[in-house]
Image (spheres, rainbow, N blue to C red):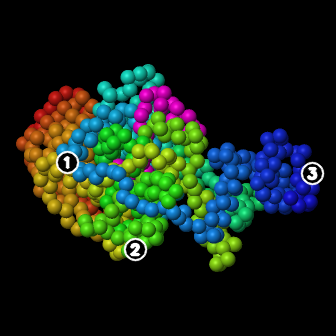
Amino acid sequence: MSMSITNSLSANRGIFTADENAMIDKLLGCGQDHLFSSWPAPGTDDDDKRRFLAQAAVCDAGYPGGIAQYVANAKKLLQDSKEGVNPFDGWTPAVPDGIVVEYASKEHVELESEGMREVGSAAFVLVAGGLGERLGYSGIKVELPCERSTDSCYLQLYIQSILALQQRSAGEMPAHRSAKDVGIPLAIMTSDDTHAKTLDLLERNDYFGAKKEQVTLVKQEKVPCLTNNDAHLALKDADPYALQTKPHGHGDVHALLHTSGLLDRWSAAGKKWVVFFQDTNSLVFRVVPGALGVSKQKGFVFNSLCVPRKAKEAIGAITELTHTDGRKMTVNVEYNQLDPLLRATINKDGDVNNDKGVSPFPGNINQLIVSLEEYKTQLAKTGGQIEEFVNPKYKDASKTAFKSPTRLECMMQDYPKSLDASACVGFTVFDNWVGYSPVKNSPADGVGKFEGGNPTHTATSGEMEFYGCAAKVLELAGAEMAAPVDFSANDIVVPSGPKVVLHPSFACTFEELKGKAGKGLKVTSASSALIVEGAGVKIESLELDGALVIKACPGAFVTVKNLKVSNKGWRFEKCGADAPEIDRLRGFVIEKDETEELVFDQPGAYTVP
Ligand code: UTP
């Protein structure tokens, strides 16, 4: 520490509390003297100095082991990065143990019934702290409608799906349920970028029917940025009393679940599983019961939901790694690391397809199921710290200066890296159409992906895939559905069949759905729309060419028999650049010309017509 800093700081020491002085000592102790080098004598900017120390204290408390640990980790990772250390040196990959499930197969139906026996013992965790820079929406992603037919937003879909599972599992809830038990809990990880808007969305909508105590928000803190290989913390250009900070990544969720006490609470309430999912995947609840069945059947302490992966696709691969020293782990390998790893070890051609036309390694979609007891025990050991990485953009080959301050990041799928080799880690593969349809990309980026022959993951594809999945599930249950036609919006082309929305209340599993709709249902035009809400709806025979909405309140049992509906229906029309933001993101609006509505808002038994 230089003399002048000591002097200027010692002069200031008297104006601070013991805690503030302790924070200064912590920063000096990890080589951050530069932060104080321009501090004026006491009497000038004193409130700003306190503001700085308060912010440092938030960063300190928000990171396992505090700022000193963060700086130590950063120095090590920056050193490794400078020296070009290969994180996979000594590791050889192999395809791990897992299950490929064909939706609607006999095996899937059995897994779903196993999963439904477990779901009352599950807690759900939505990670929703991301900025969504690629999508470029001005609000939070979970408030976006997943489709415009009913305008249900992602958070609404998720909560109603959880409530539907809860209703089915009422008889399967842990035996020692107390009056205080809130049912199936949902924790949402937010960040400064999303917290207030998420809370507001919930409050404005009465928690979408959940009990307020059922939903817990935990907020992740950002981490300080680093200016050089010595891990010096960066100050803001415009404010020398503020640290520059950036998001640390979704891996924070593990430490937060641990420190918030949620895991203990869930465990005390008899919960056994924690299911993680992301802000915009409208299909995830179609595959949760089956995947939970896999976790139970195979005894997986960690189960990654996957889709078939095409070689070189920009999606992480689940890989079993064995080290020359005998260590073993089953982990996600990012796609840009997979190819060099394979070339260096088992396949000189790198990341290529097998004879079935897919990569032998399944593609991780980051919906994860962990077994609570093992998870809780493990986090108590590690504090939830997840292996981090750093990705500095260097100014030149000397790798000494960065183009802009960098920071450490961590990913939730890296949790298994901390597990013993004996831990039972596996995966469950479902096809894309039924399990994965994220909305991550702006219309402009979507065009690039479309032209490259890749999934666009835009609001346009997200909406059409949501309808398409429901239509296909009905088809598998025996329905006749008009074939999809090409639909173009925002300069991409997507398949567009009947616009089917099956509200979460209608059915949770394939078997339940098949008991309520399938054979006897005929949708004769791709432009038709069918919206079904309510657990009591049963479609025995229906022919539809147009738009039909069937809504039954709880306790209303509605049998649709020999019904024929034909009307002008709905049009999906392109919208212009002057349309509201939500419409512009998908590139179309719905003109509802004519709709047959069958609404039953009183309990009772009904037959239509
Ligand atoms: P994404 O990969 O979609 O990243 O995150 P993002 O930050 O939201 O979007 P871009 O990269 O800026 O376009 C996957 C999931 O992880 C959550 C997101 O909200 C999303 O559900 N996430 C991401 C967090 O909760 N915290 C983070 O720090 C980052």
First reached walking from the N terminus: tag 1 or tag 2: 1
Residue 510 occupies quadrant: top left
Say which element carries label 3. Answer: helix
Judging depth in this view, the residue of 354 and 8 nearest the camera is: 354
Q: CA distance from mark 3 to mark 1?
A: 75 Å
Q: Residue at x 88, y 47 (%)?
A: 13
- Where does the image place residue 568, in percent across and percent down from the top left? 17, 56
Q: CA distance from mark 1 to mark 2?
A: 37 Å
Which mark is in front, 2 or 3? 2
Question: Is label 2 within 8 A of ligand 1 (CB to nearest ligand atom)?
Answer: no
Badge number at residue 11: 3
First reached walking from the N terminus: tag 2 or tag 3: 3
In this rendering, would 543 be left or right of 279?
Answer: left
In this rendering, would 366 be left or right of 62?
Answer: left
Which amino acid type is marked by label 2? Lys
- Where does the image place residue 332, in percent across and percent down from the top left? 45, 57
- Where does the image place residue 517, in percent across and percent down from the top left? 16, 43
From which residue to which does the magenta span run? 257-284
Say which element carries label 2. Answer: loop
Q: Residue at x 86, y 58 (%)?
A: 1
Q: Residue at x 33, y 65 (%)?
A: 359
Question: Is label 3 within 8 A of ligand 1 (CB to nearest ligand atom)?
Answer: no
Say which element carries label 1. Answer: loop
In this view, 17 is above or below 279:
above
Give the residue at mark 1.
105
Which amino acid type is marked by label 3? Ala
Q: Residue at x 59, y 50 (%)?
A: 192
Most extreme residue toward the front, as rendered? 325
How packed mark 2 is, by other alpha carbons closer than 10 Å (few <14, some 14-19, many 20 or more), is few
Quadrant in which the C terminus appears: top left
Give the residue at mark 2.
348
Residue 438 occupies quadrant: bottom left
